[in-house]
Amino acid sequence: MSRLARFTPWVLALLLLAPVGAGEAAAEEGIAWVEDLPSAFATAKAQQKILLICVNAKHVTGRQGEEPAAKGLREVVYKDARVIERSRDLVCALLTAEGSADDYGELRVLGIDGDLVSPQHIFVHPDGARVLYRKEYWSYGQGEPAVEALLGMMDKARAKLQAEAAEPESSDAPDAAPDGADRAVWIAERIGQVVSEGGAKREAALDALIQHDRDGDCIASLIPLLVEHKKNHILLEAVIRALGRDGLQSAALPVSEFLRHKNDALRANAAVSLEYIGSREKKVVGALKKAVGKEKDAGIANHMYRALGRCGVEDPKVRALLLKKADAGKSEFATYGPCIGLTYFEGDEKARRGVEKLLKKLGVPGSKRGGGQNTVKRGLLSWTLAAIGDAKSAEFVREELIARLENVQAFWVEGLRGFWASVAEKCDGDDSLMPGIEAGVRAFVGFAKEFDLGRYGAETRSLMDASRKERDTSTFRPRGDNLLDTGDED
């Protein structure tokens, strides 16, 4: 029996997505689903079409019953006449919970390995060797916005393929743009597209510039747009998002200038982009600390705290600030960003002991310090400790948390005991338990909603707002994305 099986249903469900397969693919009319992934790759290459892989499992980790977003896609969105018509230009594969090792092999070629998120949509280049566009999770429901979202993803993948086809023939390497004077012209043309175009065409031009940057020449041409077009908030947002790439240090300071902008979307996107960049430059960390101290929007402040966690991981003052805010935010929701930011402090002894103190202060539900309040925060801090904890943390969880459940009489005790047992084992070194722990946090959110713990001051808002959605996670995946999103909005 899997160790995850000891959790009660409302805390955890097993990951039923793996192994991934396409067993239910061709059963109904509509989209012409290819029955298995190897055949889908071969067909796409032979027909020189984009391959769309729809990962769609009926049951996923952390949810009892059918996953609503996946169900809405299968039963409504994929059956929409416009989606079906547009799908004729693609090769489509539906991956469900039945499959074979061959499917895994095909995904590994694309650099996709480990646990798969469901639902998600992966658009693969006709050559079968790289991803054109990938969108994990689904937050658009099953109505008109959902249809428009999927059609928009199809357009983005097609625009990126067309942009590549329009480039001078060369190798497939990221520096395949021309050299010399021709290269300067190539960069200027794409900068012009960024300024004059919109939507998918602008995104394709931005992506081409980022992917084909050589020694900072493309980035150096993009950054001035942040000053030259300061009144065009839509353009600024697109450029700030494009510059949010792991390790893109030259963009960090210019992006940090927008942390104090009057426009909410620009402040939020600047913070998220800085988390992706991960700059440890003192001026960038200083700008984040200054901005978050004056930020009035709790959601944007959470983005800033998460960026501080990654950028300020070497700064003791940042660690102290995150611990303070994780303990005493103005609301439970306001503590989420600091908690997630602390997970970047791996190997930091003071961060570990600090999180343990916060958990001890919260106490066990049902105790004098527990109750309904801080239900989600307690679960989130436990996840934080699992991410950075050590053997001493495991001992703490067993002695200060699990042992104190002995005299608590409640229906949820066994589930919580199992959750904390996995946290302790993860701190002891069993990394395989982390997906289950994350699913437990999502279940705490659902539990809080079901029992209306909002009356105790709990907030269960998702942290996945527009500034985080549609980001390229191919080289960096932020800590905690979708951790507090149970999919109920779907």
Image: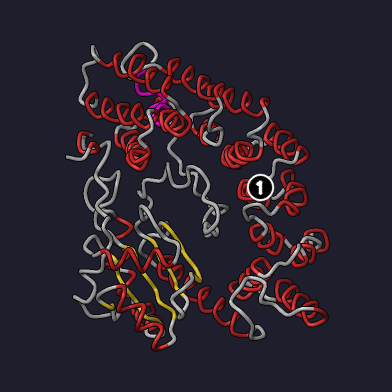
255 and 36: which is toward the camera: 36
333 and 435: which is toward the camera: 435
Residue 302 locus on image (x, y percent): 57, 38
Residue placed furthest toward the left: 1
Which of the 4 image quarters holds residue 123? Answer: bottom left
In this view, 73 is above or below 418: below
Which of the 4 image quarters holds residue 484? Answer: top left
Q: Identify the residue at horizontal 41%, vertical 56% (top origin).
A: 137
Label 1, residues with CA under 10 Å away: few <14, some 14-19, many ≥20: many
Q: Identify the residue at horizontal 34%, vertical 18% (top origin).
A: 401
Residue 363 locus on image (x, y percent): 39, 16
Locate the N terminus and report the quarter of the image it occupies.
top left
Report which residue position mark 1 lands on.
274
Dot 1: element = helix
In this view, 127 is above or below 249: below
* Residue 26 part of the magenta-drawn span: no
Residue 402 locus on image (x, y percent): 30, 19
For residue 246, side relative to residue 156 (left or right):
right
Residue range of the region highlighted in magenta in the rendering: 370-379
In this view, 208 is above or below 275: below
The colour scheme of the drawn protein is: secondary structure
Which amino acid does the dot numbered 1 rest on?
Answer: Leu
How many numbered discs, if any?
A: 1
In this view, 5 is above or below 392: below
Locate the C terminus and report the quarter of the image it occupies.
bottom left
